[in-house]
Image (cartoon, grey):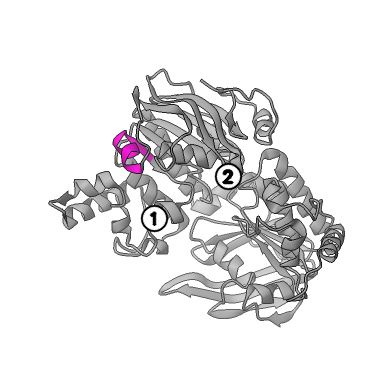
Amino acid sequence: MVSQPVTSPLLLSVRGVVKRFGALPALAGVDLDFPAAEIHAVFGENGAGKSTLMHVLAGVLRPDAGRIALEGRPVRLGSPRAARRAGVGMVYQHFTLVDALTVAENVALSLPEQPRWLFRPAAAAHEARALAARIGLDLSPPEARVSALSVGARQRLEILKALAGAGRVLILDEPTAVLTPQEVQPLFAMLRHLRAQGRLVIFITHKLREVKEVADRVTLMRRGRVVATFAVSDVTESALAAQMVGDAVPVRHRGPRGGSSGAVVLQLSGVSVGGPGGTSGLAEVSCRVRAGEIFGVAGVDGNGQRELFEVLVGLRRPSAGSVTVRGQPLSVFTPRAALAAGIAHIPPDRQREGLVLPMTVAENFLLNRGILDRFSRRGLLRRDAARRFAAERVQQYALRFADLDAPVRSLSGGNQQRVVVARELAQQPDVLVTVSPTRGLDVAAAAAVSDALADVARHGCAVLLISTDLDEVLDLSHRVSVLSRGRLSDALEPPVDAAQLGLLMAGATLALRPSV
């Protein structure tokens, strides 16, 4: 494939941009042109430099070399504030809103000329409405607390903040990662509206269907360099995947073929947990997961997923109900007790909950009591045996990095996730609880993690997959339920109607009864 020339006037230009982290070149001389009135997707494998480039454009990182121009004029984007003043705004995958403040107050925080000592709520609400009207964005009531907004409404507010002050460039990082299917289409409609206004929209995604559906052009990055830029209309999804990883990626069928007839390994009976502010985090949740089964729990964040995960891994004691593993009830809810019962877990945030970033790769493989005990004798670590164990896991899971003594923070997101998966599955658990295991991973890394989950299930493990990504749930699960407002729906077996699941995720009251 050949790079597509830009035919319309340039809005943003990048020339020779270099960014290093120590000896690692995250960006190695990037050249890119972005015209106005375009939706431009940037994709590539984990560690390709996509996020680094976007952070440079948003003023979060300063490049070591190169130049950036807006409408032909060189600009210095040395901070997020400088980038916003230049007209470049970014919406991050993890929102940066202040939940305790109102919609208008959150917008006011992003306005370039906000008085430091005097805040007028009525004026702020008027400004928020006017800004939303100019952009053509459906804004929640300016007086509403952000904590009460849906995920889709929060994302619209983040976009409004990013475009405050006549923003001409909008950057989005994995914009659909936390949205229901019903919220994705309004987002795409909004992006098309911004394009019609002459704005430039750049978004990072690993979902090839999104690239085909909404983008005009797409840029592939690999190892800190731009490989090619091409018109989306000229390329297929399979060709995009092959371009990303250098080889064809097999197409996955929706849902595993056939259910599991194994014995019940994990059973929840009437599990309830109090949520924040007296709300119900979990309300009489019941389900059974059999040996050899991947049981998918879909849902939008904030509907009890966190509480369910914490109960099962021993971080929270339920206020009612019971949890049993192979018929034995859990009487103590601590991480040590969960591990002793045969429960392993892949947490929702690999960097905050699965790894210790300053520690080495080899040391992170030992961050599990069972593994640490295996290589300890009388309180002393058998380092050679521990390193052999780590090296074996590296080879088994095809990790790519410099050496075992490299800090795990230097690994790409996909390789970091593989460290967590390899460590947890080395315990050969009876139960695996995993939350959004392929979030933010490229096609190859996501396929590797998915294959690992399918393999551990084939060997008799009961896998509980909790995810906000409907595609992930449908691709991997034998049965699927939806967790909404703390309640679990009836379990459905493939083929599953994605539209119905989307309605349940959005809060519809269809079949919201305990699943058994």
Q: Visible in this render: residue 159? A: yes
Residue at 48% x, 45% y is 446
Q: Nearer the viewer, mark 1 or mark 2?
A: 2
Disc 2 secondary structure class: helix
* Residue 341, magenta (yes or no): yes
Q: Residue furthest top?
A: 261
Q: Where 119 sits versus 182, above or below?
A: below
Q: Where 244 sits versus 298, above or below?
A: below
* Residue 276 numbered tag: 2
* Residue 304 numbered tag: none
Which kind of residue does numbered mark 2 sit on? Pro
Q: Quadrant of residue 106?
A: bottom right
Number of other residues with Cα within 10 Å of mark 2, as a class: few under 14, some 14 to 19, many 20 or more: few
Q: Main secondary structure of the magenta part?
A: helix
Q: Residue furthest left?
A: 378
Which kind of residue does numbered mark 1 sit on? Leu
Q: Quadrant of residue 103?
A: bottom right
| Residue position marked by numbered label 1 in the rendering | 355
Q: Visible in this render: residue 212? A: no
The one nearer the camera, 247 or 407, is 407
Q: Residue furthest front?
A: 278
What percent of the width, then of the height, locates residue 301?
59, 43
Residue at 42% x, 34% y is 454
Left or right relative to 64: residue 359 = left
What percent of the width, then of the height, locates residue 159?
73, 58
Disc 1 secondary structure class: loop
Range drawn in magenta? 335-344
Q: Quadrant of the N terminus?
A: bottom right
Going from N to C along the chain, the mark reached first, 1 or 2, is: 2
What percent of the width, then of the height, locates residue 452?
40, 39
